[in-house]
């Protein structure tokens, strides 16, 4: 794990106005801060959230923007950035827009999953058997701790299975 040298955090949360202007969609916070929507130069367009009230001040929303930059040293030296933008219909209201990107993006909260898709969901880790022998002990521990239905054979078990005539498939996966 790299040693974190410096970290920078930006948090912008609060009531705001979502407006459609001639230049595009903007989020105007009550303190006068402005987030302007601009997808120019991106490989794929990121469409802005919809604005219901096209005239006047726009839609009253709750906006939360977070950005975390971590400068790291060591084997994984570099800058790692994580960003998220959530626009809701008022504080604690329905999610109108959600975008997240970065080096480490946490799982969505169950309430957010329900809000976005209208159904509940639970996390179910999948266990994939490892192919490389060097990882077999780690894979065995991961399988047993995360998914009881996953089985992983030891090196001895694989060797015994390979010695049975006509059972070369398990030896080839070792």
Image (cartoon, rainbow, N blue to C red):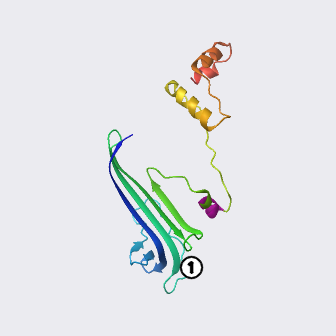
Residue 110 as seen in the image, left or right of residue 87: right
**Above or below, 20 relative to 133:** below
Residue 48 as seen in the image, left or right of residue 76: right
Question: Looking at this rendering, what residue extends furthest in the bottom direction?
Answer: 56
Q: Residue at x 48, y 84 (%)?
A: 57
Q: Locate the C terminus by quadrant.
A: top right
Q: Residue at x 38, y 75 (%)?
A: 33
- The crowding category of the residue bearing disc 1, from other C-alpha atoms within 10 Å (few below 14, some 14 to 19, many at least 20), is few
Q: Locate the N terminus by quadrant.
A: top left
On whether residue 70 falls in the magenta region, the answer is no
User: Is residue 46 something that shows in the picture?
Assistant: no
Along the line of sight, the residue nearer the viewer: 58 or 172:
58
Tag 1 residue: 52
Q: How many marks?
A: 1
Q: Residue at x 61, y 60 (%)?
A: 111
**Residue 140: x, y in percent?**
58, 29
- Give the residues drawn in magenta, as a range: 112-117
Q: Quarter-wise, where is residue 81 in the image?
A: bottom left
**Above or below, 71 relative to 24:** above
**Residue 24: x, y in percent?**
44, 76
Along the line of sight, the residue nearer the viewer: 24 or 53:
53
Q: Secondary structure at mark 1?
A: loop
**Residue 17: x, y in percent?**
48, 78
User: Is residue 73 something that shows in the picture?
Assistant: yes
Q: Residue at x 54, y 26 (%)?
A: 137
């Amino acid at each position: 794990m790299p040693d974190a040298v410096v970290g920078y955090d930006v948090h912008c949360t609060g009531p705001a106005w979502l407006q459609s202007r001639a230049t595009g969609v903007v989020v105007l916070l009550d303190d006068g801060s402005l987030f302007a929507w601009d997808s120019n130069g991106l490989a794929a367009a990121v469409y802005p959230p919809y604005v219901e009230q096209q005239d006047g001040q726009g839609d009253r929303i709750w906006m939360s923007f977070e950005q975390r930059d971590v400068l790291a040293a060591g084997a994984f030296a570099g800058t790692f950035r994580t960003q998220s933008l959530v626009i809701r219909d008022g504080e604690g209201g329905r999610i109108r827009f959600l975008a997240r990107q970065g080096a480490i993006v946490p799982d969505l909260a169950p309430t957010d999953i329900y809000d976005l898709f209208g159904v509940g969901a639970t996390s179910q880790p999948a266990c994939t058997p490892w192919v490389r022998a060097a990882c077999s002990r780690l894979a065995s521990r991961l399988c047993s701790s995360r998914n009881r239905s996953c089985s992983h054979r030891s090196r001895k078990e694989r060797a015994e299975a390979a010695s049975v005539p006509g059972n070369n498939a398990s030896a080839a996966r070792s």
